[in-house]
Amino acid sequence: MAGRMAASMAGGMAGRRACTASAHVAAVLGCLAAAACERIVEVEIPEPEPMLVVEGRIELVKEAPGGTQTIRLGTTDAFFSNRATPPATGAIVTVTDGAGGVHPFAEAEPGHYVTHDLHARIGETYTLSIEYGGDRYAASASLLQVAPIDSLYFMFEEETLINDQEGYRAAIDYVDPPGGPHFYLWEQFVDGVNEPPPSSGNQFNLISRDELYDGEPVIGFQPNDEIVIEAGAQVAIRQVALSRRGYDYYYAIFEQNGLGTGLPFSVPPATIRGNVANVTRPERFPFGFFEAAEVSVAEGIGPER
């Protein structure tokens, strides 16, 4: 009995070793066969017809009203391109005000169209017209009022789990007017450069709606708390009035750019429709947005430590 049990156990172990050896050989042969069949497959992605990208805002700056307005036009690029948005040159650009006055925009540099005689007014509706590549594009926007920035100053913060770098951040105070809703966009320039960090959290600090603070003072607000201000740096914060549709557009842009370049008018990974229409070929809609806004600007210089 004991001999049969020992023989049975020995046979079982031998069988298992044989099975294991066979499985090992099969696995090796499988790997060799897979390696022998491996090859590089090149996939060509057809490049579609470039689409227009519009960046336009008619502005009335509270602190320095003037007649200079700029509209930027670009085109979409190849799928895997890392270049900046190519300029759209040779377009015919005009803006018509509510009184019927037509303001032509001349191309000052590739893709940058400028006029010096459009003095914006609150409540006025402006209509954009673009002729480019055989198509005509159009959009309209009413100029909305914005609360003034009362003060700009700098707050020093130590390095913490939230702030990965100690230093000064720019902050502002303002009073939201009652009777909203009011929508805001903030642009922070440091030495002339506007650099929003490419984070999907931007929709919670670079744009806002006054749902929770209607008619209240806002103290110590940091529109761009990830940017440390160096001593002597020139800082300007622009507080821009947005429409509800403009707020929704920027919200989607900032959320999408958490995976992109961080530039507000780079082409996002998903299609985000603005308010500019292709009148000639509606199916070939452009990217971008046209708006009209009052802007409040505050400036300061980064303090010494």
Image (cartoon, helix red, strand yellow):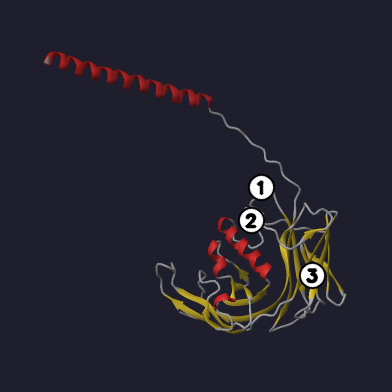
* Residue 79: numbered disc: 1
Precedes in sequence: disc 3 or disc 2: 3
- Amino acid of disc 1: Phe
CB atoms of marks 2 and 1 within 8 Å: no
What residue is rendered at 62% in x and 83% in y?
Answer: 178
Q: Which residue is at the far bottom? A: 150
> What distance separates the C-alpha of mark 3 from that of mark 2?
26 Å
* Residue 268: numbered disc: 2
**83 or 284, which lies in front?**
284
Residue 140, placed above or below residue 232: above
Answer yes or no: is residue 199 visible. no
> Which numbered mark, 3 or 1, is in the foreground of this view?
1
> What distance separates the C-alpha of mark 2 from that of mark 1?
11 Å
Q: Which residue is mark 3?
A: 114
- Amino acid of disc 3: Val
**15 or 56, which lies in front?**
15
Quick one: label 3, few (<14), some, or many (20+) residues within 10 Å? many
Q: Would residue 124 appear left or right of 168 to someone viewing this image?
A: right
Q: Give the secondary structure at mark 3.
A: strand
Place of residue 57 in the rendered image (x, y in percent of width and height, measured from the top left): 73, 70
* Residue 49: numbered disc: none
**190 or 126, which lies in front?**
126
Image quarter hosting the N terminus: top left
